[in-house]
């Protein structure tokens, strides 16, 4: 299998980079082919702007959807974006590794998503607007996993923790960025208190990480409800009989009932 590791942490001695190294070694030993996108080393351009469209169809007004659609369809994207899109298309699984900065991914990784997730590729699939999203789309059949280094203690990110439940904090990524495109998203691998792990704690993290990597293609994904599976009759709102007492993010996960 082909596996893409996308990581965003400039410090070579960080836990994030350690997880990258372990993933590379463990997955290669399993017989997989590993490709990396080391965003800081690449000097990835994080800002999505007019420079991404060297052949504008409308020089007077920048419409990101229209320009992205045109650039992707006519081979007018910048070379760096095309190269990253090819990596994603070739991958059977995509693993995003990053430290949790202000409750989300670093800006450079958000910029990678914004620039690489082009119209016609990651959204607007087959020119049909929102017809193929949340469980369908160009990336259907691929697996996705987040490996997140968290500075605070686990209790702060528990369901009643002061920072909020981690999976809900990451919902815009797991559901809105990855599942939206059709990917099967595995439960997040999180390391808490990442800046002050004891040698024993680090050994446990390494063992748990290797175990999660071993199940990359076997473990059950988060059971997000698909758009076209019957849960959303009008493609927008949950049917009245589904999770009738629930609102919020948890209602869109099947086992939350």
Image (cartoon, rainbow, N blue to C red):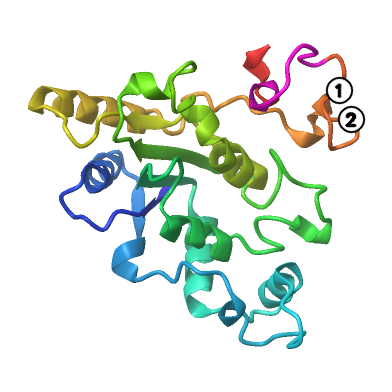
- Residue that sits furthest to the left in the current view: 199
- Residue 7 at x, y percent in the picture: 35, 53
Residue at 62% in and 24% down = 223
For label 1, the SS is loop
Picture quadrant where residue 9 is located: bottom left
- Provide residue 24's location: percent of width, then percent of height: 27, 47
Label 1, on which residue? 239
Res 132 visible = yes
Q: Residues within 10 Å of mark 1 (few under 14, many from 20)?
A: some
Q: Is residue 164 left or right of residue 179?
A: left
Expressed as whole percent of the image width and height from the top left, the position of residue 95 reads 42, 45
Q: Please tell me the numbered disc located at residue 233.
A: 2
Comes first in the chain, label 2 or label 1 = 2
Q: Quadrant of the C terminus?
A: top right
Please tell me in which quadrant of the rendered image residue 194 appears: top left
Q: Is residue 4 above or below residue 67?
A: above
């Amino acid at each position: 299998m082909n596996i893409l590791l996308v990581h965003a942490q400039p410090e070579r001695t960080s836990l994030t980079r350690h997880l990258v190294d372990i993933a590379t070694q463990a997955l290669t030993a399993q017989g997989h082919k590993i490709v990396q996108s080391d965003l800081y080393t690449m000097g990835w351009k994080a800002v999505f702007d007019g420079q991404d469209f060297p052949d504008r169809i409308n020089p007077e007004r920048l419409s990101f959807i229209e320009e992205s659609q045109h650039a992707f369809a006519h081979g007018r994207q910048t070379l760096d974006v095309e190269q990253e899109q090819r990596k994603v298309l070739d991958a059977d699984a995509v693993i995003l590794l990053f430290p949790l900065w202000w409750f989300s991914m670093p800006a450079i990784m958000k910029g990678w998503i914004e620039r690489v997730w082009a119209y016609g590729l990651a959204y607007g699939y087959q020119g049909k607007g929102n017809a193929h999203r949340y469980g369908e789309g160009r990336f259907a059949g691929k697996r996705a996993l987040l490996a997140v280094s968290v500075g605070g203690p686990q209790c702060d990110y528990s369901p009643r923790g002061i920072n909020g439940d981690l999976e809900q904090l990451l919902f815009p990524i797991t559901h809105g960025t990855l599942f939206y495109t059709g990917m099967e998203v595995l439960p997040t691998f999180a390391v808490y208190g990442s800046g002050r792990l004891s040698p024993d704690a680090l050994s446990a993290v390494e063992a748990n990480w290797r175990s999660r990597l071993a199940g990359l293609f076997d473990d059950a994904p988060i059971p997000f409800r698909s758009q076209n599976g019957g849960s959303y009759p009008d493609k927008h709102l949950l049917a009245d009989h589904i999770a009738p007492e629930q609102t919020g993010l948890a209602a869109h996960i099947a086992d939350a009932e």
